[in-house]
Image (tube, rainbow, N blue to C red):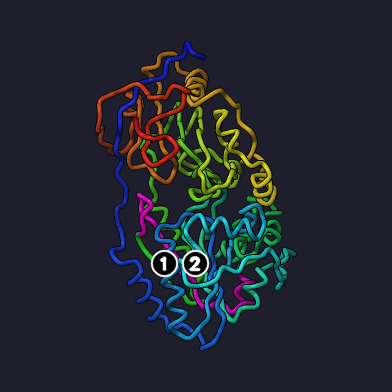
Amino acid sequence: MQNFEIPGVARVRQFFNREELEDPEGELKRLLEEKNLPIKKGSRIAITCGSRGIDGYVPLLKTIVAFVKEKGGIPFLVPSMGSHGGATARGQELVLEKYGITEETIGAPVVSNMEVNQIGTTRQGLGVYIDKNACEADGIILFNRVKPHTSFRGRYESGLVKMLAIGLAKQKGAEATHFLRYENMAENIIAVASVALEQLNVICGVSTIENGYGRLAKVHVSRKEEIMADEPDYLQDAWNKMARLALNEIDVLIVGEIGKEISGTGMDTNIVGRFHTNAAGGGPRTIKLGVLNITEKSEGNANGMGLADFIPRHMYEQIDFGSTYVNTLTSTEPNSSRLPMVVENDRAVFQACVKLCGKIKKEEIRMVIIPDTKHLEEIYMSGAAIDAACRPIRVESGFMEVPFDRDGNLKLFEGSDDSAV
């Protein structure tokens, strides 16, 4: 593959929605007070904690915990992430620790196990399961980011409703809800969450929405009876604020790293335009896709690698197939964890993508390099990609050869596994 030349690239800046809260904790505290929530003195209140990298995760959690304590409640944190963390209690604690979420940092204990109680059955016959500790609490506060899902479309996608139906249901409940496949997921999470809302003492839900730069744009508090009505509007707002790549077609897309804190599928399918289910679609048409690393916080969970065509050997060596396959079997979609072709190093990933992208001249190849699908402001694009941009961008450097170290690994992005040249 050494005969296939890699196009030169320039650093490019994209522009997205910049709405951002100046005082997120103050706004959240104000909204919590405003809702006049029914928290009684001495009541044990479970607060859900998912596996996604929410902007402001720690300070927002601390604000919720402090609020519960001010009202006389006794807060505790419940890992609410389905089968993530290898579907073990300690594994899910470790996921939260990677975000800095511990009893010492938040001020409330993390109570983690994989036991669930069945609290009902949907009309379709699906069992409704909820974390045992949350069931035994006097009240539950749901906390999650609202955003478009990577695997299905519906009025409710990623958010509080899905947190109730899947995250708080642990592996057993997540597996049950996924059992009828993603084509039915939009209906299933509504059915399961509706039963859960009827049976559980949900105090409120705290929703966040991020801008196109992954920064906190809005925070909302919904009382129990408002959750189902509020969330579709929040989802539409999240769609409107979401970052995108400024091309309709990409010949070669290189993603620096994938990870569970970035997306449930490691990389946001809505960004790369590749999907592992038939229940979702959109984004650019991507001809060849290479992925270079797994984030440290993912603990080897490589879910999403199946969307790629090529990975380097060092990424293959990062994979924990046990946790990856537990996650994938729970979601019922093996395509997301199929092993791509493994090549020697990052340079070989580029060369393989270039060879098979369908363009003879390197000057015609629309190539884009991104650090991950959550950070899209500063990326690298070939000349043909810049010429094909369908939204305003700004070129911020001259063209250069793609830089690799002596081992053939990319040296481009600061703050990631690929450090700056």
Task: State which quadrant residue 79 falls in.
Answer: bottom right
Q: Give the distance between the C-alpha atoms of the residues marked 1 and 2, in whole angstroms.
A: 9 Å
Identify which residue, 377 or 115, lies in the foreground. 115
Q: Which part of the image, by quadrant, shows the C terminus?
A: top left
Residue that appears at 40% across and 16% down:
362
Q: Is residue 17 visible?
A: yes
Q: How many marks?
A: 2
Toward the top, the furthest residue is 3
Label 2 environment density (alpha carbons within 10 Å; few <14, some 14–19, many ≥20): many
Q: Is residue 68 above or below residue 352?
A: below
Identify which residue, 270 or 416, lies in the foreground. 416
User: Which range is magenta?
Assistant: 194-216
Rendered location of residue 17, percent (x, y): 31, 51
Rendered location of residue 208, percent (x, y): 42, 63
Instruction: Of the two numbered discs 1 and 2 on the same chain, state the one appearing first in sequence.
Output: 1
State yes or no: discs 1 and 2 in contact (Cβ < 8 Å). Answer: yes
Toward the bottom, the furthest residue is 41
Residue under numbered circle 2: 143
